[in-house]
Amino acid sequence: MQDRLPPHETNTNTNVNTLIRSTPFFTGLPEAAVEKATAHLVTRNHPANQVILLENDWGSSVYFILEGWVKIRTYNLDGKEVTLNILGKGEIFGEMAALDEVPRSTDVITLAPTVIGNLPAQDFVNLIYTEPMAGVRLAQLMGRRLRQVNRRLRLRESDSMSRVADTLLFLADGQGKRTSEGTEIPNLPHRELSSLSGLARETVTRVLTKLEKKALIKREQDTLRIPDVNALERLII
């Protein structure tokens, strides 16, 4: 089990303020509202494979990923780990526990060295209550995540090629970086893709090799590139 070590904490600075304002949630919000909401925000630096939150923790903060990657996980009835989502730079988590004032329902673990902006839950809630556009941003976030989950559930009975392709497209939709050579996503360990797709790790490895031979993906040390998202989409049946 990953250790919950004390993270390195820093106060906000000009770079952090720029990063927090560039996140989709804060984009377009009035400057005065953003300044007020982030007045007590602090950043914490976490190494890879560190637990940030545990299920049943209380929602005292809302978290913004300023750099790095985290996974959201839970466990099934057999005690097997299930990865629900992978979140990267600009994403938010912990917002539902803050709004509902209930313990958290999932764990959050870093996949790489990660910088997190911690916003007091009450400051976040006050922003939602007082700034209409913040509520719209939150609704858009929830809607996108719901569409992603619905799509993954529909493909649970599809063949392994379709399910791995859909997992890669799921990551590209949420965290893909568009470049002139295609869409880049993190080259995650096969066990993470296995948990996301619901397939055995050996099956994921085999499918990725086939996709690479077909030139539908290109794997490098830290990056997996999808040259043509539409070509990968056409594999899904």
Image (spheres, rainbow, N blue to C red):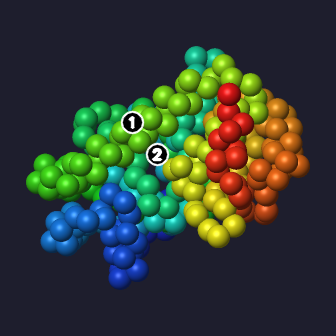
- Quarter containing the N terminus: top right
User: Badge 2 local density, few (<14 within 10 Å), some, or many (20+)?
Assistant: some
Q: Residue, x 37% and y 69% (percent of image)? A: 22
Q: Which mark is residue 224?
A: none
**226 and 194: which one is in front?**
226
User: Badge 1 local density, few (<14 within 10 Å), some, or many (20+)?
Assistant: some
Classify 90 as above or below 168. Answer: below
**78 and 27: which one is in front?**
27
Under mark 1, the amino acid is Arg
Q: Residue, x 77% and y 50% (percent of image)? A: 216
Tell me: 205 left or right of 175: right
- One can see residue 236 in this view: yes
Where in the figure is residue 23, as x and y percent of width and height? 38, 63
Secondary-structure class at tag 2: strand
Classify 215 as above or below 80. Answer: below
Secondary-structure class at tag 1: loop
Q: Residue, x 81% and y 45% (percent of image)? A: 211
Q: Which residue lies furthest to the left in this view?
A: 130
> Which residue in the structure is indicated by mark 2?
53
- Quarter containing the C terminus: top right
Disc on the earlier residue, 2 or 1 = 2
Task: Find residue 103 and report its image quarter.
Answer: top left
Classify 232 as above or below 220. Answer: above
| Disc 2 to disc 1, C-alpha distance | 8 Å
Tell me: 96 left or right of 155: left
Where in the figure is residue 192, as x and y percent of width and height? 68, 42
Task: Find residue 85 and report its image quarter.
Answer: top right
Q: Which mark is residue 104?
A: 1
Whether tag 2 and tag 1 are in contact, CB under 8 A, the answer is: yes
Where in the figure is residue 229, as x and y percent of width and height? 64, 51
Classify 84 as above or below 69. Answer: above
Q: Residue, x 59% and y 51% (percent of image)? A: 172
